[in-house]
């Protein structure tokens, strides 16, 4: 791989991002995940599926 190819690949890798969320909010992700688990458990219990 030449320096020109490496620079071109780095440029394309930078442009390939989809604009998704950054990885800085791990705490909020965990809180939202556990909130979903609790709400889902309440729904299953209320419907008598368990």
Image: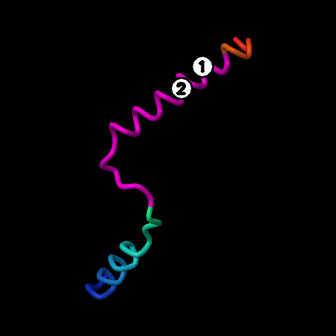
Q: Against 24, is 19 above or below?
A: below
Q: Is residue 45 left or right of residue 8?
A: right
Quarter of the image for residue 49 reads: top right
Q: How many marks?
A: 2
Image location (x, y in percent) of residue 26 = 34, 41
The secondary structure type at the circle numbered 2 is helix
The reply to whether the magenta stretch includes residue 40 is yes
Q: In x, y percent, where is residue 37?
A: 53, 26
Q: Which residues are magenta?
A: 20-44
Q: Position of residue 22 (x, y in %)?
A: 36, 55
The main secondary structure of the magenta stretch is helix
Question: Mark 2 sits on what residue?
Answer: 37
Left or right, 39 with respect to 16, comes to right
Cα–Cα span, label 2 and label 1: 6 Å
Instruction: Establish if 14 lies above or below 25.
Output: below
Q: Nearer the viewer, residue 43 or 13?
A: 43
Residue appearing at x 73%, y 12% in the figure: 48
The residue at which mark 1 appears reads as 41
Q: Residue at x 60, y 25 (%)?
A: 40
Q: In the rendering, which numbered label is found on residue 30?
A: none
Tell me how the rendering is colored: rainbow
Rendered image quadrant of residue 10 = bottom left
The residue depicted at 34 percent of the width and 80 percent of the height is: 11
Percent x, y of residue 5: 34, 84
Look at the image and say whether residue 25 sits in the magenta stretch.
yes
Q: Are marks 2 and 1 in contact (CB under 8 Å)?
A: yes
């Amino acid at each position: 791989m030449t320096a020109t190819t490496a620079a071109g690949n780095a440029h394309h890798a930078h442009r390939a991002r989809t604009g998704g969320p950054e990885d800085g909010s791990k705490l909020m992700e965990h809180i939202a995940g556990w909130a979903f688990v609790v709400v889902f458990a309440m729904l299953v219990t209320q419907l008598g599926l368990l």
